Amino acid sequence: MHQQLFQNVKDILEKNYLINKDQHILLIYDLKSLLSTLLTNAYQKAIQTYPHDIINFHGVDEEFILTKFQNLPKRSLVILVQSGSFRMTKHRLRADLFQQGHMVIEHARLSFNDDNQIENYINALNYDTPYYLKKCNKIAHLLQENKTITVKSENNLTLTINSKYENPIKNTGDFSQNSNASAGFPIGEIFTEAQELDKINGQILVFATPTLEHHTFFTDPFIVTIKDGLLISHNGPDKFNEMLNIIRAEENNKVQVREIGFGLNRALGFSKRLNEPTAFERFAGLHFSLGMKHAMYRKKFDKDIVQKYHVDIFCLVDEIFIGNIKIFEKGEYLDKK
């Protein structure tokens, strides 16, 4: 397992970020979880031959880290390995570093994952960018050429979306078209949303949702009913209902369905789980977001419309069609043209 992790982080450095031998690397880490310790050890080994600095986040004060950031060579690579999420006054580390022109690799909330999920997390870091590119390009093309997405689940449940789609956002680890590189790992996803949000109708099975504490809550699959783009009913657990009530209370008594997310990471799935939901949304399958908030499509609505919540639901689907092309069946994306 340790050798596989070392190979994975080495591939991230060399194949995704294409670092050169003179690239300066700053590793900021903590050792407050087993997974953060394993990742830290792997990165320490992988960066030995590059100019580098290593900082234990909890071993220094904030001013020391800010000074280190100010003195970073131009276009350095900063690696953040976090059991939780590093907090600094008025600073969002990944965003600030990116805006300063540095490259960033981020592993966040690692302690949220159980120790028995560590192997799943390590496998989810496998270099799979050529596959992600192939699938993203295919899905993006189909979304451009078709107006209908059909999702079929067991017990004859069907969800349909009849709309044009927003420009999809790809998370592939290929930064060749970007002036800079920054990503939260694991990767592997393409998402969009309907231009006409009221054109989402039907029923779908859900097997997991985030909690208020930002943990993935896995449960027996339950049915969610969507009408005119709004979640109107479900037969799921009380914990899910509590989340919906919070959204309704602050977003005009509605639960809007927005993001349509196609997760592509083959190391994650219904039986290959992670408790940290931002990482788990990359699982090979489908998720939707609930609530009005969506940073990438924010300008779709007037500024006076409150956009506060973005809560993903992870779906258990049998088949996904874009137009009349089946792209997904029984946990796998299809290679058929």
Image (cartoon, rainbow, N blue to C red):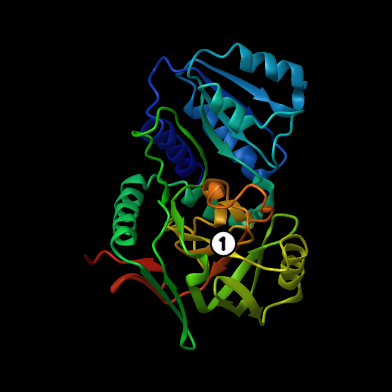
- Examine the image and state in which quarter residue 129 appears: top left
Residue 188, horizontal then vertical, whole percent: 44, 51
Residue found 38% across the figure and 20% down from its top: 20
Nearer to us in this view, 121 or 230: 230
Residue 89, horizontal then vertical, whole percent: 77, 28
Q: Which residue lies furthest to the left in this view?
A: 337
Q: Is residue 138 left or right of residue 320?
A: left
Residue found 41% across the figure and 67% down from its top: 163
Q: In which quarter of the image is the C terminus?
A: bottom left
Residue 30, horizontal then vertical, whole percent: 69, 33
Q: Is residue 292 above or below residue 317?
A: above
Q: In this view, does 56 lie above or below 220?
A: above
Residue found 35% across the figure and 53% down from its top: 136
- Could you tell me how many numbered marks the image carries? 1
Nearer to us in this view, 247 or 207: 247
Q: Is mark 1 on a helix, strand or loop?
A: loop
Q: Which residue lies furthest to the bottom in this view?
A: 155
Residue 63, horizontal then vertical, whole percent: 75, 17
- Examine the image and state in which quarter residue 280 appears: bottom right
Instruction: For label 1, count other residues whose C-alpha is less than 10 Å away and answer few (under 14), some (14-19) or many (20+).
Output: many
Q: Is residue 71 above or below residue 326?
A: above
| Residue to which mark 1 is pinned | 273
Q: In this view, does 12 lie to the left or right of 240?
A: left
Q: Which amino acid does label 1 sit on?
A: Arg
